[in-house]
Amino acid sequence: MLVATKALRHEGELLLSKSLVLLWQEKIRRLRMIKTIKIKDAVGTKLAHDITEIRPGEFKGAAFHKGHTVCNEDLCRLQKLGKNHLYLIDLEVDEIHENEAAAIMAGALAGKGVDWENDPREGKIGLKANRDGILVVNVAALAAFNMIEEVMCATLHNHTMVKAGELVAATRAIPLIMKRAPIERAAAIAAQGGGVVSVRSLRKEKAGLIITGNEVYHGLIEDRFAPILTRKLIDLGCEVDRISFAPDDTEIIRRAICAHIERGCDLILLSGGMSVDPDDVTRKGIRLAGADEMHYGAAALPGAMFLVAYIGKVPLIGVPACGLHHRTTVLDLVLPRILSGEKIGKKELAFLGHGGLCQDCSECTYPHCAFGKGA
Amino acid sequence: MQDFDMLLKNSAAAHGHLCPGQVVGVRMAMLGCRLIGLDEPTRIDQIKKLIVFVEMDRCTGDAVAYVTGVKLGRRSLKFVDYGIMAATFLNLETNTAFRVISTEEARDLALVYAPEIPEKYPQQLEAYKRMPDSVLFRVQKVRVDISEYDLPGPTRKKVSCSQCGQVVRDNREVVNNSHNLCKPCAQGAYFSEAEEVTWPNMNWTPAQKEQPPVIVADAEIKISNACSHQGTKTRRGIIIK
């Protein structure tokens, strides 16, 4: 036992000294590839990275760019920026500069509908939408990418509506220089499934509206749903083909749905009759019309009694009465996604829950609020 | 090679249960074999080309062994007790080797790859199926200098321990002052207080179809040597201090 204990202790000491050697070797390696020189000796050398200037509330950006040859006139300004030393870089074959790393990562992160320019600023590259549409973020790939040490990418929220030219993501390598292998692995992760960020155009669908309810059908009250839904559809680039009215009668609702499909509608919105009263029969009408997939209930407020169904490839959206009262509801979260070609099912409606609670502000600022941002 | 689902099903059956470690192990083995150019590692023409060094004794290790067909007794499976979720796949024909390491971040990423599953292990299990290889693993190209005494094939060397007489195979002896010693004698062993015993029905052979009953009382087992000193008592009754 004594021998064994000694052997273990010896092994432990050996391991400790080995790890110290490795640390020391790494330190020497870094020292070898980055040299520090005093500012007075820097004239004639090229800057290894952008030098940032920050004037609070006024300016933040590169005062000097990477590759700039330092001249006498620069010394005073550099010192004012707090630079008394500069780095000189001597890259090993397996090392990479932050600008090259940023370009490799940007190329992998950018999916369809996203462009970037190989013009890093302070090591960062911005990724921009090259068309109007909905931003789609591969959240899992983004998380996996950011778990790689020394790289980062930040994006707008998944499913944000964006315009062409709008910044949707940015990436950078954290250190000035790093090993090439982790960057290439990060790029491989980012490229899975066609990039981390992409922008899907919305299809300009031909939509049909069916306003249900005895009270409207029989003229007891004036319909206010059709103008609201029409405005939302037109704002998203759709065309409203026809507006039908139906009483709380499953057969008439069924016939109205079938008529819209026969007219070639790509999308049908139905309002009313989505609740739990005996007169609320819209769901049954949708089923009778041949819906082969139906999801009732969404994890969002307002809009819990929302419905999405499909007859073949035609989506049917059941809009609950909250759509009359609230400016923004679950419809505003889901409709653009459907128009982008996304299939909405149980999972998509369930995942709305995180961030799906509208704060019902006195003045609605959507989309500049948290509503729908967690999905 | 069978497809992933079939490999996982059969590996889990061989291991005893389906768990996240099985998913990682099956995928680790599939990737490792692919990297060293073997598509059917259990087929007769490839089976002798492969050696796998497994660095952990967890569920993953069993899955790697199942998929690759490597075995301890065939000397194609080497257990290296690092406690690291990694295995190295060596092609003896081409002398290429890759070390495949299961990433720690994959555990944290299970939540985003399978968010609809709330329980930890089912979530990991599903997430590890969905993650691409690039997320689940890191890979290193490595050189493995393998001794001829570690290769498959017949025993290459036998010596007897000069202290206890035990035969030691394949160069595992320790030479101390020109004496060959087995490792227990030279370095101490994982066991202690070893005493030779006799036991009931000790002359049983498989020719006797009926198996003798299991021994339920320690009293049935007799220590054959009266000495009770500390140290290792050998079959010759010599006490090693």
Image (cartoon, coloured by chain):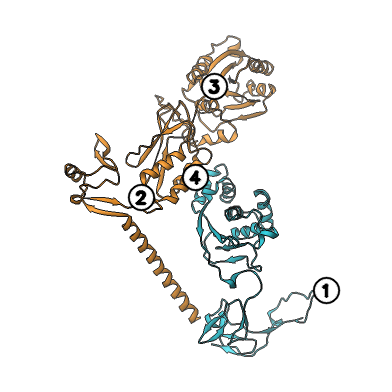
- The residue identified by callout 3 is A321
Give the CA separation, mark 4 to mark 1.
60 Å
Pointer 3 chain: A
Give the CA separation, mark 2 to mark 3.
57 Å
Residue occupying image coordinates x 64% and y 20%: A279
- The residue identified by callout 4 is A188
Q: Amino acid at mark 2?
A: Ile
Q: Amino acid at mark 4?
A: Ala
Residue A177's tag is 2
Residue A112: x percent and y percent?
Answer: 49, 32
Q: Are marks 1 and 3 on the same chain?
A: no
Give the CA separation, mark 2 to mark 1.
72 Å
Residue B49: x percent and y percent?
Answer: 63, 62
Within 10 Å of disc 1 (Cα), the crowding (few <14, some 14-19, many 20+) is: few
Residue B45 found in image quarter: bottom right
Chain B painted colour: cyan
